[in-house]
Image: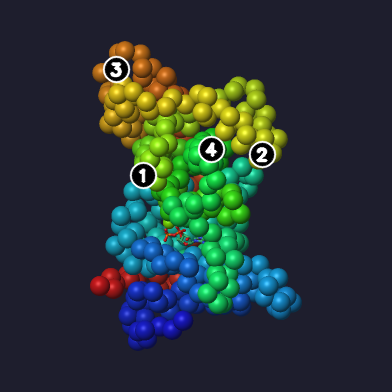
Amino acid sequence: LKNKKITKDKGTRATVENVLDQRTLKFVNKLIYAGVIQQLNGCLSTGKEANVYHAFEGDLLQPDVSLKKQYAVKIYKTSILIFKDRERYINGEFRFRNNKSQHNPRKLIKIWAEKEFRNLKRIYSHPFILCPKPIDIKNNVLVMEFLGDYNTDATTQPALKLKDYDGYESLDDVYAMYYKVIAYIRILYRVCRLVHADLSEYNTLVFEDDLYMIDVSQSVEPEHPMSLDFLRMDIKNINLFFRKKFRNLVLFNERDIFQFVITENIDENLEPELIKNRNRDEYLKFLMDYIPKNIGQKLTIDDVEQDKVYRNLYLVRDLNGLEEKDFDRFTDGKFDLLKQLLASHNKKYAGKKIKTYNIDDDDNDNDEEDDDDDLQVEEDS
Ligand code: ADP
Ligand code: MG
């Protein structure tokens, strides 16, 4: 990995497409010196916001590569434009309130990477949703467990995205996957207290025949004023994917999925018990039995119409409460449960303060690296 531009000025910091800037290389090297990773191997993905590389664990006492742990190293890019677009995910989130660093792009990607790391840790700390194990983070460089088999020849098999996975043996298998995705959305909200906010067939991987959730940097807590809007979007994307890929699947009403996700307990006694027991198979089985029996299918014109209405509801919450005026139009009782659930979500999260995350408090960085942080990164294009 070499830098294309090496000059003494700001140019050194600019991100050249697919090449790491000096500053990022410094953080990669820190991870190498600390014995976390060995080096960066092949690039697994180049995205708009981040590149993902493969790396072996840095433990020198394990010279046998085939026995080494494998990591995915996600490196957030340092260009400004992209992060402008993402500000809305951070704005309004209590964890990131009052944060002056928000407008410094380099600080912002650091917050961004840190946010993904924290969200991964939170998801990983519960046994129900599979995700890569978070390993370490240095500024904009995040190390997590690699899902797949990496080889230096052409036989590398990274986990497939849900989009590309075709290991279904029957339509039942497809339904099981659909139910599992929906169960994950609920577990994420109910147990991990997060809304993914970019859930799709690209951000879910299938590894060893099970489903993994990835790419959680933009995930928000239910307190976020737009959390329900993001949730609605996640549900829509998932339905859209299953409709596109499996034409003969009968889908659920999005409104019903949404209601299912934000219901506090779908069984007052059993569900809290299952969560407490921390037995993944048991809890998943409970949810996946419940889903087809209780979530309405989109079968009639009326079902489709209801989804249309639901999609147009104004769900963005201000700090005092959810805008409920739209609901007044629905007097036929169909939206009563939804109204009730939104009210209880709102009551639960309105104005609730949680610990404010202060970027300067953490130990991933030191003054030496950040003393010139008020410099602005120039756009590369
Ligand atoms: P982006 O922000 O670029 O979408 P993602 O976190 O979604 O970043 O990662 C991009 C791609 O990199 C994924 O679709 C997946 O193919 C691969 N990838 C990411 N994390 C891992 C991992 N832990 N193990 C294997 N592949 C991964
Ligand atoms: Mg992604």
Q: Is residue 331 above or below residue 176?
A: above
Numbered circle sitting on residue 281 = 2
Residue at the spot 66% in from the left edge and 39% down from the top edge: 281
Point 61% across, 36% down: residue: 284
Q: Position of residue 343 (x, y in %)?
A: 41, 23
Which amino acid is tagged 3? Phe
Which tag, 2 or 4, sits closer to the chain's start? Answer: 4
Give the percent coordinates (x, y) of residue 154.
52, 74
Report the mark closest to the observer, 3 or 4: 4
Q: Is residue 125 left or right of residue 239?
A: right
Horizontal side of residue 173 vs 18, given as left or right: right
- CA gap, disc 2 and disc 4: 18 Å
Question: Viewer-proximal residue, 130 or 275?
Answer: 130
Q: From mark 2 to mark 1, how far is it between C-alphas?
A: 29 Å
- The amino acid at mark 4 is Asp
Question: Badge 1: few (under 14), some or many (20 or more) residues near its Cα, within 10 Å?
Answer: few
Up-down: is 74 above or below 203? below
Q: Position of residue 6 (x, y in %)?
A: 37, 86
List the residue tagged with mark 4. 172
For disc 3, the marked residue is 330
The CA distance from mark 1 to mark 4 is 17 Å
For residue 331, above or below residue 240:
above
- Residue drawn at x 25%, y 72% as measured from the top left: 381
